[in-house]
Amino acid sequence: MFPYFNISTFNLGPLTIHTWGFVVSIGFACALFIAYRRARKIGLDGNAILDLGFWILVGAFLGARLFHVFFYEWAYYLQHLWEIVRI
């Protein structure tokens, strides 16, 4: 059985951190670190792995935003097109 905790956000000073996003970012950072170390171990360029991780992160943000726009709030964004690029 998976443990369940009901902490959706926590605050670090004026900054509000969402727990789910924090855990996902830790997982992404750990996976990137492991890929970097493995690449260097087999003789590949570790910086290429870090660059790839950056572009994967950019693509994930863009893809998530487009998914949200097209599948959840399409009627709203048709009337407010500039809101699509708003973060």
Image (tube, rainbow, N blue to C red):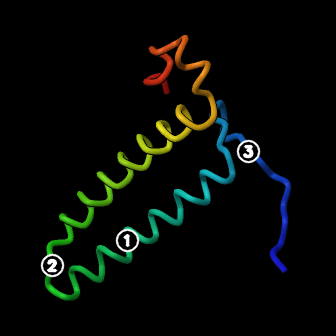
x%, y% of residue 73?
62, 28
Q: In this view, does 70 lie to the left or right of 36?
A: right
Seen in the picture, residue 1 relative to 27 is either above or below; the reply is below
Name the residue nearer the viewer: 45 or 56.
Answer: 56
* Three-letter residue code for mark 3: Phe
The disc at residue 44 is 2
Which one is earlier in the sequence, the residue at label 1 or at label 3?
Answer: 3
* Three-letter residue code for mark 2: Leu
As helix, strand or loop, the secondary structure at mark 2 comes to loop
Taking the spot 66% from the left edge, 53% from the top edge, the residue there is: 20
- Which residue is labeled 1 in the image? 33
As helix, strand or loop, the secondary structure at mark 3 comes to strand
Q: How far apart are marks 2 and 3 (CA)?
A: 39 Å
x%, y% of residue 46?
20, 71
Name the residue nearer the viewer: 19 or 12.
Answer: 19
Q: How far apart are marks 1 and 3 (CA)?
A: 26 Å
Q: In this view, does 80 lie to the left or right of 61?
A: right
The disc at residue 10 is 3
Of tags 2 and 3, the one toward the viewer is 2
Q: Distance between the residues labelled 2 and 1?
A: 14 Å
x%, y% of residue 24?
57, 59
Taking the spot 37% from the left edge, 71% from the top edge, the residue there is: 33
As helix, strand or loop, the secondary structure at mark 1 comes to helix
Which one is earlier in the sequence, the residue at label 2 or at label 3?
Answer: 3
Seen in the picture, residue 75 relative to 20 is either above or below; the reply is above
Graded by Cα atoms within 10 Å as few (under 14), some (14 to 19) or many (20 or more), the crowding at tag 1 reads some
Question: In which quarter of the view is residue 1 placed?
Answer: bottom right
x%, y% of residue 84?
47, 23
Say how many tags the image has: 3
Of tags 2 and 1, the one toward the viewer is 2
Taking the spot 15% from the left edge, 79% from the top edge, the residue there is: 44
* Three-letter residue code for mark 1: Phe
